[in-house]
Image: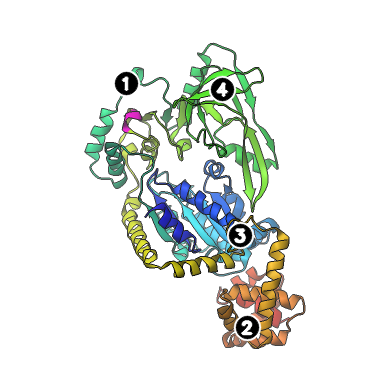
């Protein structure tokens, strides 16, 4: 599937798993989608599985955003408590599009917890509370870290698999698979074949021969190329050693921060620039952030410090010959378009060495890679796929694990490709009128503006729009229409109409008797049973009642029943 085809699917509001090989354009595609959403007044929640990935996309970790934090399991009462927190409830109810990047490193148990909290916070039974969910990543890359003997979340379908795609939440979400097939990083046929062989787990002997052709001894490795190691200890040792061996005056740059300590701590953990960066003229450096203003550098661009001005501003000459005066950059955690915290530092780090883990998402022109101590599935694949061409690859050595990808992912990959091909065929046959109708329906349901090129709506604009929408619902209700009939006539979900009815009731614009005439016969019959649960657990929160009734009645049913049994 091409990037344009994937965007066509995303714009319909469907749940999507956006995947593809390294360099296929996943980040470019999702950034294009985010721009399109904002042009139509829809602010997505942008999250990632790790702090490093979150800083790459200007978002926050899914753990922080959803309120689950560092928990590895949730009870029913934990879910109710988290969902009732004001910040979690505000995020959940104010979000119609949730993006989760680097999903390969997110365990199925965590995905289950996020799903449970969002359903409770939004008081809706649909997966993730009915918002569009876009998961992005490549399961052939680094897998999730799962704590041994961790207690599973309530209702989690525990199995041997740690992967998100094996979870019940993923199955209920049932995302359309968009498997990007174009290659925008590697163009070298021999190199592409090498990576494909490792990815598929086939023709390993030929892959080894290709790696041998790029093998170098320690003393013969290019001194200026960054080195990728499996462990932090090797990275720290080499960077410190190389800097200390250089002549010249050291210049230290200290990170500044603004925001709550907990948010700043998350930002620092995810930022590739260190809290204290020490540079000397001649130091080998790597840019740690994309230049969004002019594209002069990207995360992973390599260079050398050629000068440090009197005011401390360093000048870096990149390997491609560009000269850049490097100014401090910001890393932020945002939520619904608001900045919650920021750190400021030069977008640089010493680049004689870096870990494979921190290299994920980077594109390198050249690298010296040491995989002799590789210990995880996908580690070698991630390291090798950072480099653009085979000529830029220099391998000090590897072990057998370095050339392995997870067998469970290999097994499931064919299913992902098949489902992507089916989606491509389905959306390819959709005519432009039908597609436009789907897109407009999604924009409308998400509270956006169909007219392109608009800024995100301010609260007053959204309130006015909601007022108009409520008035339309009220008019149909007064005409004796049922909730199902109003939803069909207005082209909206029944849950949206129920929200309208609830708010209209609170403003005394519809009566309890009118609502009783609008509900389904099944709900009318169940009212005494639901009323008994409300008497026992109270009417302040719906989640305890929903759980006590074993999920038989939806949150929408309970909202109406609460009014009718008061």
Cα distance, mark 4 to mark 1?
A: 32 Å
Q: Earlier in the sequence, mark 3 or mark 2?
A: 3
Mark 1: secondary structure:
loop
Q: Give the position of the C terminus as an image quadrant.
A: bottom right
Cα distance, mark 1 to mark 2?
A: 76 Å
The magenta stretch spans residue 393: yes
Mark 2: secondary structure:
helix
Q: Main secondary structure of the magenta part?
A: helix
Cα distance, mark 1 to mark 3?
A: 53 Å
Cα distance, mark 3 to mark 2?
A: 33 Å
Coloured how? rainbow
Cα distance, mark 3 to mark 4?
A: 42 Å
- Asked if one can make out residue 455 in the rendered structure from this viewpoint, the answer is yes
Badge 1: few (under 14), some or many (20 or more) residues near its Cα, within 10 Å? few
Mark 4: secondary structure:
strand
Residue 453 screen position, x and y as percent: 59, 56
Magenta stretch, residue numbers = 390-394
* Residue, disc 2: 529
Residue 6 screen position, x and y as percent: 43, 56
Disc marking residue 217: 1
């Amino acid at each position: 599937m091409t990037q344009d085809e994937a965007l066509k699917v995303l714009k319909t509001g469907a749940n999507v798993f956006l995947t593809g090989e390294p360099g296929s354009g996943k980040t470019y595609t999702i950034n294009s989608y985010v721009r399109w959403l904002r042009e139509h007044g829809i602010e997505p929640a942008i999250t990632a599985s790790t702090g490093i990935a979150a800083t790459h996309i200007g978002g926050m970790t899914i753990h922080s955003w959803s309120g689950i934090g560092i928990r590895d399991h949730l009870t029913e009462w934990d879910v109710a408590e988290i969902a009732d927190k004001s910040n979690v409830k505000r995020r959940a109810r104010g979000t119609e599009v949730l993006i989760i990047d680097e999903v390969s490193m997110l365990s199925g148990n965590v995905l289950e917890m996020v799903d449970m909290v969002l359903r409770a916070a939004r008081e809706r039974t649909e997966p993730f509370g009915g918002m569009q969910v876009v998961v992005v990543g490549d399961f052939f890359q680094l897998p999730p870290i799962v704590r041994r003997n961790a207690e599973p979340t309530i209702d989690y379908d525990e199995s041997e698999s740690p992967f998100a795609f094996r979870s019940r939440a993923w199955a209920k979400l049932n995302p359309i698979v968009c498997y990007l097939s174009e290659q925008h990083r590697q163009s070298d046929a021999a190199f592409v074949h090498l990576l494909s062989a490792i990815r598929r787990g086939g023709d390993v002997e030929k892959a080894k021969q290709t790696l041998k052709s790029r093998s170098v001894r320690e003393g013969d490795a290019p001194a200026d190329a960054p080195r990728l190691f499996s462990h932090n200890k090797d990275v720290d040792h080499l960077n410190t050693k190389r800097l200390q061996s250089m002549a010249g005056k050291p210049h230290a740059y200290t990170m500044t921060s603004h925001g709550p300590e907990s948010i700043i701590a998350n930002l620092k953990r995810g930022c590739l620039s260190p809290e204290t960066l020490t540079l000397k003229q001649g130091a080998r450096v790597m840019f740690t952030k994309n230049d969004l203003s002019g594209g002069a550098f990207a995360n992973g661009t390599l260079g050398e410090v050629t000068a440090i001005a009197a005011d401390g501003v360093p000048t870096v000459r990149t390997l491609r010959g560009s000269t850049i005066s490097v100014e401090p950059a910001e890393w932020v955690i945002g939520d619904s378009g608001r900045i919650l915290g920021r750190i400021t530092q030069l977008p640089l780090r010493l680049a004689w060495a870096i870990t494979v883990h921190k290299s994920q998402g980077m594109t390198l022109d050249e690298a010296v890679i040491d995989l002799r101590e590789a210990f995880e599935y996908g580690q070698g694949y991630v390291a090798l796929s950072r480099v653009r061409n085979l000529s830029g690859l220099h391998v000090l050595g590897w072990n057998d694990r370095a050339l392995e990808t997870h067998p469970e992912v290999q097994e499931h990959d064919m299913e992902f490709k098949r489902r992507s091909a089916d989606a491509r065929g389905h959306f390819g046959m959709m005519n432009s009128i039908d597609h436009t109708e789907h897109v407009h329906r999604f924009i409308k349901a998400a509270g956006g503006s169909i007219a392109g090129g608009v800024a995100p709506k301010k609260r007053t604009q959204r309130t006015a729009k909601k007022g108009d929408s409520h008035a339309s619902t009220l008019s149909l209700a007064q005409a004796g229409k049922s909730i199902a009939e109003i939803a069909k006539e207005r082209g909206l979900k029944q849950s949206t109409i129920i929200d309208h009815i609830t708010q209209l009731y609170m403003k005394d614009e519809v009566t309890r008797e009118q609502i009783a005439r609008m509900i389904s016969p099944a709900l009318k019959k169940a009212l005494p049973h639901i009323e008994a649960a409300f008497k026992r657990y109270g009417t302040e929160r719906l989640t305890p009642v929903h759980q006590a009734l074993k999920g038989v009645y939806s949150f929408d049913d309970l909202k109406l029943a609460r009014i009718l049994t008061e």
